[in-house]
Every structure is written in structure tokens, then in C-alpha cells.
Amino acid sequence: MKPKSFAGMRCSIAGALELIGDRWALLVIRDLSLGLSRYDDLRASTGIPAATLAARLKHLTAAGVVERVRYQQRPPRDEYRLTAKGRDLWKVSVALREWGDRWNATGFGAPTVETVDRDTGRPLVLALVDAETGQAVPLDRIRLRPGPGADEAVRRFLDPAAGANR
């Protein structure tokens, strides 16, 4: 059964999910962000079926998330690299990993990877920061407001005056 398309929804999360495709695509993006670039290495790392990997790479390339680069002429061989658009998805994979670590999503009881400061070795976590000051903002101070692309339904849902602010 083919999943319902999110195309046309006024939701950036739905649009991103439509563009990324599926869970295999996120694992491919994860591995590309870790430095893998060759088809066989991506297959070995994820255990993804060959036809599925080929389809995901084609989809991600068409979406501008991945680029295919020739590294050998004879025989012709290509590798895959994240574009700037694809590199921006790194934060998504870190957020998913942090959530999975916190809630033991693997069932193995301990994280397999940690994000640390290269100089100090201290653990790092994703945070929402004030765009002007660069300071982390505590969760209890965060709220959503309608953006420039919001339709009337979103404006009503997020209107602080109506008390629906989340």
C-alpha cells in the first residue's frame, strides 16, 4: 500500500517528510553525514535492499538533498554526497538520536554514539537558541506563533489572544 502524499499541506513537517521520503532515506542521510559515500558502503551499513537503496538515492538526488559525483571514469563509478540542503538535515538526525537515546528506542540500554565538544570532550545537546543573542531558551519560554505562510486555520489555532498558544 502506497502511503498518502503530504504534498500541498501547509505544514513544514509534512513537506519535509514528503521530500525525505521514508525511514530508509533518513538512514542514508545519517550515513552520508557520517562520511560514507559509496553505494556498497551505504548498503553494508544499513542492510538496505539494493533496489530500495537505488530508489532512495534517486529520490534524494531529485529532491536536491544528495548529489551524485563521478569519482572514476573506467569503469564508471559514482559516489553520493549531501548537498547544503542535505547537510542541514544533520540536526534532524541528531534530534532523533537524542530522543532515541533518552527513551532507549533500541532496547540496548545505552547510546552507541555521543555528540561531544572536540576541544573539551563535554557532551553536547541540541537546543533552541535566540537568533539574536545565541543564548539557549528554556522550554517553558518557547511558544509558537503564525508565520508569514500561515493560513486562517493556523492563525486561529496559534492566536495567543484566543488562548490556544502552545
Image (tube, rainbow, N blue to C red):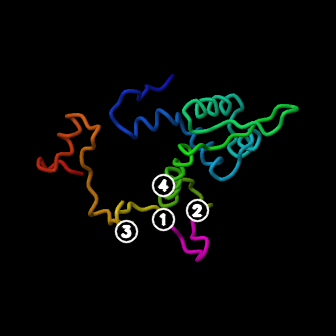
Residue underneath mark 3: 135
| 6 up-or-down from 97: above or below | above
Residue underneath mark 4: 95
Camera-side mark, 1 or 3 = 3
Q: Residues within 10 Å of mark 1 (few under 14, many from 20)?
A: few
Camera-side mark, 2 or 4 = 4
Q: How many marks?
A: 4
x 57%, y 53%: residue: 106
| 79 up-or-down from 145: above or below | above
Of all residues, the one furthest to the top in this rendering is 1
For residue 111, the mark is 2
Measured in 3D between alpha carbons, the distance from the residue under mark 1 to the one under mark 3, in whole angstroms, is 14 Å
x 37%, y 68%: residue: 135
Q: Residues within 10 Å of mark 2 (few under 14, many from 20)?
A: some
Residue underneath mark 1: 125
Marks 2,4: beta carbons within 8 A: no
Task: Give the amino acid type for the residue marked by disc 4 in the picture.
Answer: Ala
- Magenta residue check for 54: no
- The magenta-colored residue range is 114-124
Q: Earlier in the sequence, mark 2 or mark 4?
A: 4
Q: Residues within 10 Å of mark 4 (few under 14, many from 20)?
A: some
Task: Give the amino acid type for the residue marked by disc 1 in the picture.
Answer: Val
Camera-side mark, 3 or 2 = 3
x 61%, y 71%: residue: 118
